[in-house]
Image (cartoon, rainbow, N blue to C red):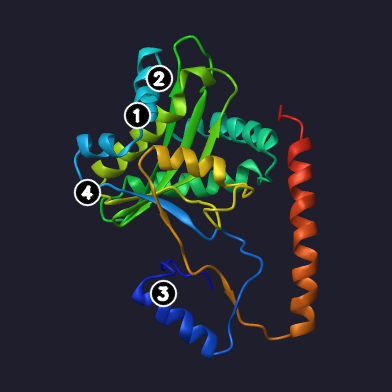
C-alpha cells in the first residue's frame, strides 16, 4: 500500500503504528516517489506570485515577453507531446512506456473533463513559440475533486533560454484553480531534503522557487507473505530499474 498521508500528521502517526503492529514493513523499494511538493491554490493570484521567488517571477514574465504562448491541447496533440516526452526521457535517463499506453491514460482524462458530473478530469498544456513548428514544452495535468497533479512533463532543448516551463507551470496552476482545485500537487520531492545527492534536488529547487512546500508522506509499505521471494525481489529490482534507465537513455527517436 502507498497511502496519501503526511508522515508527521496525526493520521500518519496512527497509521504507521498500526502497520508496524500488524506486521507490515516500510518498503525499501519505493516504486512511486515517496514525497511531494504542494502549492495552496486558495489564495488569489497576487498571493501565489508573492510566494514565488523573485527570479521565478522574472522568468515567468521573461517567457511572456519572448513570445512563449500556452494553449490547451487536444487528443490530436498527444503524439507531439509524446515526442517531447521521449526527448526528455533520453536527456534525463528515465524509462517510459509506449505511446499507446500513455494515449489511453491521457485520452481517458481528457474525456472525463468534458463530463460535468465526473469529479476527475485533465488537461494537456503546451508551450509554443511563433517561430517554432512544434511545442517547446508541455505537461499533462490530472485532477480529482479539489486536487490537481502535475504528473507528466516534457521539454525540448529549443527555446530553453526563453523559460517556457515557468509560464507553463503558472498556467497549470491557473487552470487548476479555475477547475475548482485547492491544491496543486507537483508530484515528486527528495526523500531527504538535506541529501544534496538526491536526484530530485534539482526539480525540488525549481518547485520551491515557484512557491511549493515540502510534504513528507508515509511511503509504500509491504506485507511480506514469502520472505525468501521478497528478499530475491528486493535484490533484483534495483538492477532491473537501472537497466531500464540505461535503455531509455539509448533509445533512438521514434520516426
Q: Earlier in the sequence, mark 4 or mark 1?
A: 4
Local secondary structure at mark 2: helix
- Residue 134: percent from the left, percent from the top? 53, 19
Q: Is any part of residue 72 visible from this angle?
A: no
Q: Earlier in the sequence, mark 2 or mark 3?
A: 3
Which residue is identified by label 2? 63
| Mark sitting on residue 234 | none
In the picture, residue 171 is in which quadrant?
top left
Q: Residues within 10 Å of mark 4 (few under 14, many from 20)?
A: few
Q: Earlier in the sequence, mark 4 or mark 3?
A: 3
For the C terminus, the image quarter is top right
Q: CA distance from mark 4 to mark 1?
A: 21 Å
Tags 4 and 2 touching, CB below 8 Å: no
For the N terminus, the image quarter is bottom right
* Front one among 249 and 215: 215
| Mark sitting on residue 54 | 1
| Mark sitting on residue 12 | 3
Q: CA distance from mark 1 to mark 2?
A: 14 Å
Q: Is residue 161 left or right of residue 178?
A: right
- Residue 94: percent from the left, percent from the top? 67, 44
Q: Residues within 10 Å of mark 3 (few under 14, many from 20)?
A: some
Tags 2 and 3 touching, CB below 8 Å: no
Q: Earlier in the sequence, mark 4 or mark 2?
A: 4
Q: Earlier in the sequence, mark 1 or mark 2?
A: 1
Q: CA distance from mark 4 to mark 3?
A: 24 Å
In percent of the image, x 62 and y 72: which residue is there?
27
Q: Is any part of residue 238 visible from this angle?
A: yes
| Mark sitting on residue 42 | 4
Amino acid at each position: 500500500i502507498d497511502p496519501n498521508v503526511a508522515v508527521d500528521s496525526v493520521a500518519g502517526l496512527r497509521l504507521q503504528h498500526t502497520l508496524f503492529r500488524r506486521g507490515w514493513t516500510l518498503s525499501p523499494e519505493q516504486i512511486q516517489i515517496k514525497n511531494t511538493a504542494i502549492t495552496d491554490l486558495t489564495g488569489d493570484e497576487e498571493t501565489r506570485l508573492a510566494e514565488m521567488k523573485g527570479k521565478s517571477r522574472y522568468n515567468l514574465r521573461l517567457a511572456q515577453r519572448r513570445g512563449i504562448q500556452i494553449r490547451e491541447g487536444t487528443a490530436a496533440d498527444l503524439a507531439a507531446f509524446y515526442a517531447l516526452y521521449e526527448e526528455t526521457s533520453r536527456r534525463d535517463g528515465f524509462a517510459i512506456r509506449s505511446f499507446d499506453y500513455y494515449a489511453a491514460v491521457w485520452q481517458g482524462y481528457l474525456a472525463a473533463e468534458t463530463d460535468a458530473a465526473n469529479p476527475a478530469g485533465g488537461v494537456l498544456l503546451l508551450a509554443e513559440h511563433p517561430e517554432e513548428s512544434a511545442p517547446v514544452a508541455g505537461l499533462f495535468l490530472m485532477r480529482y475533486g479539489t486536487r490537481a497533479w502535475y504528473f507528466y512533463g516534457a521539454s525540448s532543448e529549443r527555446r530553453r533560454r526563453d523559460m517556457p516551463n515557468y509560464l507553463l507551470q503558472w498556467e497549470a496552476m491557473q487552470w487548476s484553480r479555475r477547475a475548482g482545485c485547492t491544491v496543486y500537487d507537483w508530484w515528486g520531492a527528495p526523500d531527504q531534503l538535506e541529501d544534496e545527492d538526491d536526484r530530485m534536488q534539482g526539480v525540488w529547487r525549481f518547485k520551491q522557487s515557484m512557491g511549493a512546500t515540502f510534504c513528507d508522506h508515509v511511503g509504500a509499505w509491504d506485507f511480506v507473505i514469502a520472505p525468501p521471494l521478497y528478499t530475491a525481489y528486493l535484490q533484483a529490482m534495483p538492477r532491473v530499474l537501472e537497466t531500464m534507465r540505461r535503455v531509455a537513455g539509448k533509445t533512438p527517436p521514434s520516426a
